[in-house]
């Protein structure tokens, strides 16, 4: 396969060639009118030639809108691209293909894939892209819009299989917990796939992420259980610190002297009161442990 790279085409301001076309048209009439009146071939033949020259020059005119390009080919050979907006004239024998340079969005459909742990998930993304090499977009791929669509979905599937939906620990990255890292990696992988088509990826980001319906309920219960365990761990950790502080304060202020058995009973009561998820019922002890 021959790789084609964009280059600047030879084009001239259109107004200058408008004057040339007017001169050619006037010359055509200058020969045609006397030729018709006198029926003299010496006037008619040049008038036909001047007319053909006028038509040939007129074919070379074209207009470029902002963020638009014309890709020029002559008899199947790429000769260059005109990116500047305005009224231009170029080789009249060249085919001028219009190509948009505007920024475009592609929103993928929600697709079902398996994450790193094999769990079925639903995922979708939006890709912001722009044509930056008109030659590659025109000649290196068959239809660059379809190419972007297919490669975006392929990259999204590959990315989803590299991460778990939700990490069990904070060390491993996940699709849900690390959206910025996932978006950066998706953009990098997609750009590597689209370099061949002359397209630059400006942004790629997930727009939908969820467990597949068949496991969504089970995964929700697991997440709830994990949240409860994490919350209880924090509560226990705080309760231990509070009990430790209470015992230390009693000892520092000489309020009461507790032996190991009384300390154990106090720790037990405080932990039960602090850790319990229900309101504790206080019991006033007026006696002794012994």
Image (cartoon, grey):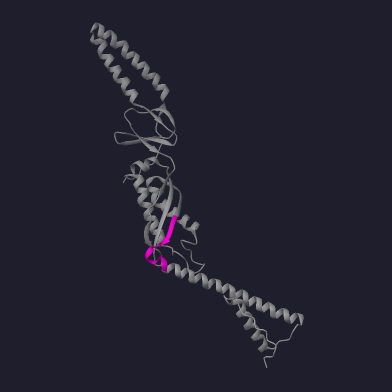
Comparing 59 with 100, the one in front is 100
Assign the C terminus to one quadrant of the image: bottom right
Q: At which x and y percent is residue 125?
A: 42, 53
Q: At which x and y percent is residue 239?
A: 62, 76
Comparing 238 with 289, the one in front is 289
Place residue 270 in its image quadrant: bottom right
Place residue 61 in its image quadrant: top left
Residue shown at 36%/45% (left/top)?
145
Comparing 220 with 197, the one in front is 220
Please say whether residue 65 is one of the residues in the magenta stretch. Answer: no
Place residue 20 in its image quadrant: top left
- Left/right placement of residue 33 relative to residue 210 reads left
> Outermost residue toward the top?
38
Q: At which x and y percent is residue 214?
A: 37, 65
Residue shown at 43%/68% (left/top)?
219
Q: Which residues are magenta?
A: 207-217
> Outermost residue toward the right?
254
- Left/right placement of residue 187 relative to residue 56 reads right
Residue shown at 31%/20% (left/top)?
53
Residue 126 to residue 38: above or below: below
Please say whether residue 213 is one of the residues in the magenta stretch. Answer: yes
Residue shown at 28%/17% (left/top)?
49
Residue 288 to residue 78: above or below: below
Q: At which x and y percent is residue 150?
A: 35, 51
Residue 176 to residue 64: above or below: below
């Amino acid at each position: 396969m021959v790789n084609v790279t964009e280059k600047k085409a030879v084009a001239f301001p259109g107004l200058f060639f408008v004057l040339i076309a007017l001169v050619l048209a006037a010359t055509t009439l200058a020969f045609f009118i006397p030729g018709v009146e006198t029926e003299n071939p010496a006037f008619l033949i040049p008038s036909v030639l001047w007319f053909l020259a006028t038509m040939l020059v007129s074919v070379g005119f074209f207009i470029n809108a902002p963020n638009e390009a014309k890709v020029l080919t002559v008899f199947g050979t790429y000769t260059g691209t005109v990116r500047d907006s305005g009224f231009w004239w170029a080789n009249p024998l060249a085919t001028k293909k219009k190509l948009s340079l505007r920024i475009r969005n592609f929103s993928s459909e929600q697709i079902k894939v398996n994450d790193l742990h094999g769990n079925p998930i639903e995922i979708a993304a939006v890709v912001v892209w722009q044509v930056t090499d008109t030659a590659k977009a025109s000649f290196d791929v068959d239809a660059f819009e379809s190419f972007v669509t297919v490669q975006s979905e392929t990259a999204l599937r590959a990315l989803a299989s590299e991460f778990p939906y939700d990490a069990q620990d904070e060390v491993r990255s996940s699709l849900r917990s690390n959206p910025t890292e996932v978006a950066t990696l998706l953009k990098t992988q997609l750009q590597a796939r689209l370099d061949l088509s002359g397209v630059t990826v400006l942004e790629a980001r997930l727009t939908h992420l969820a467990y597949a319906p068949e496991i969504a309920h089970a995964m929700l219960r697991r997440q709830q259980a994990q949240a409860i365990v994490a919350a209880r761990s924090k509560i226990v950790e705080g309760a231990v610190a509070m009990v430790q502080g209470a015992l230390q304060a009693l000892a520092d202020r000489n309020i009461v002297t507790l032996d190991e058995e009384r300390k154990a009973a106090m720790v037990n009561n405080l932990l039960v009161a602090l850790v319990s998820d229900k309101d504790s019922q206080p019991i006033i002890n007026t006696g002794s442990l012994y």
